[in-house]
């Protein structure tokens, strides 16, 4: 053996490019699709996420006291933030072409905030909408800080082990 390198172990698989291991894979991270196909795939992602991006505000904003203008603003904000999150994910994250869009996870807590008694006294629908929106934003900020603390402290790993087994 030349060069003094350690021999490869027989029981360890040799690294292969993903296309060699999975011949049905069309593209890898290092081999992106051509621009016309990439644009079509991006449009497909947009159409898929558009349903939740429109449906969630259409269901929640009227309950919050908002009208068509407020619903349009919420939809525009969701589209912008989803695009920004997707851009950050594909640049700094796992680099997977996943669309980070609206989630139904937060609908139940949002409805509980909307139905809270503290907002029922407000008669002006716009002021009611803004008050509820501030309450939802505050709850999301607190939940996000808690999730960040659990993630960086390593406690989340222990929680998932005990819950998931």
Image (cartoon, helix red, strand yellow):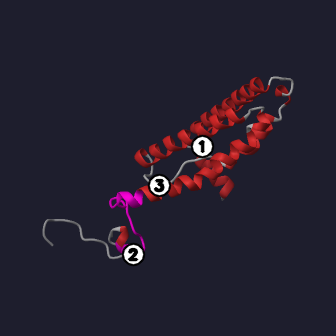
- Tell me which segment is drawn in magenta: 20-38
Q: Give whichever of 30, 33 is nearer the camera.
A: 33
Find disc 2 in the rendering and name its residue: 23
| Front position among marks 2 and 3 | 3
In the rendered image, the residue lying farthest to the left is: 2
> Which of labels 2 and 1 is toward the front?
2
Foreground tag (1 vs 3): 3
- At mark 1, the secondary structure is helix
Whether residue 49 appears in magenta in the rendering, the answer is: no
Q: Is residue 100 left or right of residue 104?
A: left
Distance CA(mark 2)–CA(mark 1): 40 Å
Q: Is residue 78 left or right of residue 12?
A: right
- How far across and how far down the image is residue 25, in percent? 41, 70
What's the residue at 60%, 45% (across, down)?
Answer: 156
Q: Which mark is residue 115?
A: none
Q: Position of residue 86 (x, y in %)?
A: 49, 46
For image coordinates 37% across by 61% down, the residue present is 33
Visible in this render: residue 12?
Answer: no
Of 92 and 146, the residue lying toward us: 92
> What residue is disc 1 on?
155
Task: Look at the numbered disc 2 and give the secondary structure of its residue.
Answer: loop
From the viewer's side, name the closer residue of 71 and 4.
71
Residue 22 part of the magenta segment: yes
Marks 2 and 3 close (CB-CB < 8 Å): no
User: How crowded is the residue under tag 3: few (<14 C-alpha within 10 Å), some, or many (20+)?
Assistant: some
Using the image, determine if residue 6 lies above or below residue 71. below
What SS does tag 3 mark? helix
């Amino acid at each position: 053996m030349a060069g003094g390198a350690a021999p490869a172990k027989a029981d360890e698989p040799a690294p292969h490019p993903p296309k060699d291991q999975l011949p049905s894979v069309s593209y890898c991270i290092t081999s992106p699709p051509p621009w016309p196909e990439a644009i079509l795939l991006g449009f497909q992602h947009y159409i898929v996420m558009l349903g939740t991006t429109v449906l969630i505000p259409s269901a929640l904003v009227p309950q919050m006291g908002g009208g068509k203008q407020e619903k349009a603003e919420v939809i525009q904000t969701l589209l912008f933030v989803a695009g920004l999150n997707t851009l950050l994910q594909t640049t700094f994250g796992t680099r997977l072409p996943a669309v980070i869009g609206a989630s139904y996870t937060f609908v139940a807590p949002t409805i509980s905030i909307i139905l809270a008694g503290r907002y029922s006294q407000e008669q002006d629908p716009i002021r009611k909408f803004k008050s509820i929106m501030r309450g939802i934003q505050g709850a999301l900020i607190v939940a996000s800080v808690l999730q960040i603390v659990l993630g960086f402290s390593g406690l989340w790993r222990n929680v998932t082990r005990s819950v998931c087994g």
